[in-house]
Amino acid sequence: MLHLLLIISVFLTALQAVAQPTDVPVFTSGEEGHKSYRIPAIISLPNGDLLAFAEGRVHGAADFGDVNIVLKHSSDKGTTWSRLQTVIDYDSLQAGNAAPVVDLTDPLYPKGRIFLFYNTGNAHEHEVRSGKGLREVWYVTSTDNGQTWSAPVNITAQVHRPKMPSAHPAYNFEEDWRSYANTPGHAIQFAEGQYKGRIFVAANHSAGPPRHNFEDYAAHGFYTDTHGKTFKLSEAVPEPGSNEATAAELSKGRLLLNSRNQQGDVRARIVSVSNDGGATWDSTYFDKQLPDPVNQGSILRVGKKNGQAILAFSNAADTQHRDNLTLRISFDEGRTWPRKFVIAKSPNGEKDYAAYSDLVKTGKKEIGVLYEKNGYAQIVFTTLNWKK
């Protein structure tokens, strides 16, 4: 009997090991024409296929330079991935901060239309913050699951407020926004309520000359209720230094914006809640339940329970290093995070072991995580059951 129990125990242990999440390489630095890949974003299509986006940095890992937006496609829930496809090539300049979303409510496109929002830039971030460059905002669309894309549409004049010389009359605003970036990660579309169909893109900007400890930064968002014909800006988050942001729909037309604290004085995420679909912010606070080393994070609505949104959140849950990538689950719209799963943790304290990530729902119980691993050597994909 004891011998039989040992056999069963060994079998169950082996089965459990096989069932553990496995990292599948999607983008590997040095391969397919780019020295580095950074800034992952991922969405699920109506047919269940996955599209994974990244910045393909041609000559190295620097944020500015010859940077393309690249794409890979999976038709088997992330087990295998297609060859690399370049979606945006802005010549020798920078295209990045991909923020994809599928519009499922436009009657002109009953099978859905993919929007890919992105930014272009003509100078390093510090130069742009110093008034010596420009970041612009664009989108392209696809109606064939990302195989082909429309001509780019420039929406800078609607969602950015740079103060430019008279040679650029479209950009003459009272504000003096300088740096600008989408989320990074997926954008969202409201699925229910009075704002159903609204596409919301989390973003951030700097205002005026560089200030001490990045106090010139502020997170914000922009949105469209007209399927991309027109756009409006949200209020800026009233916390100096709020930066890279990610958003999720709550119940009753509410929205949660989760931002990085660029100042780094509080090593936790900044949370802002809107009662009007992301137009204004009713409360902003630091969530000490979500430690952060001044890094990016991703939030995703994965279901509802008792009328409240179930949220998933991933980030490098460490106050000092980009490590300990952790997925957390909230059943009360982000007030508490009782369930957590460690996705990647450095065994030997390697620098930047797990950094940026993006989340996608792959099943009723499953979440896919696309994330940067091993000092930005790879962007990998893994799936886990969050209901265990």
Image (tube, rainbow, N blue to C red):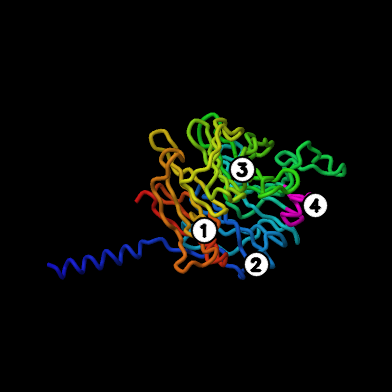
154 horizontally vs 344: left or right: right
Residue 201, label in figure: 3
Q: Which residue is mark 2?
A: 34
**Tag 3: amino acid:** Val
Q: Secondary structure at mark 2?
A: loop
Q: Earlier in the sequence, mark 2 or mark 4?
A: 2
What residue do we see at 54% from left, 29% from top?
194
Residue furthest to the left in view is 1
Can you give x and y, in whole percent of width and height, for residue 201 in the image?
A: 61, 43
Query: What's the residue at 46%, 69% (across, down)?
Result: 348
**346 and 148: which one is in front?**
346
Label 3 residue SS = strand
In the picture, the quarter occupied by the N terminus is: bottom left
N-terminal of the pair, mark 1 or mark 2, is 2
- Region of the chain picked out in magenta, as a range: 121-136
Residue 84: x and y, percent? Answer: 60, 63
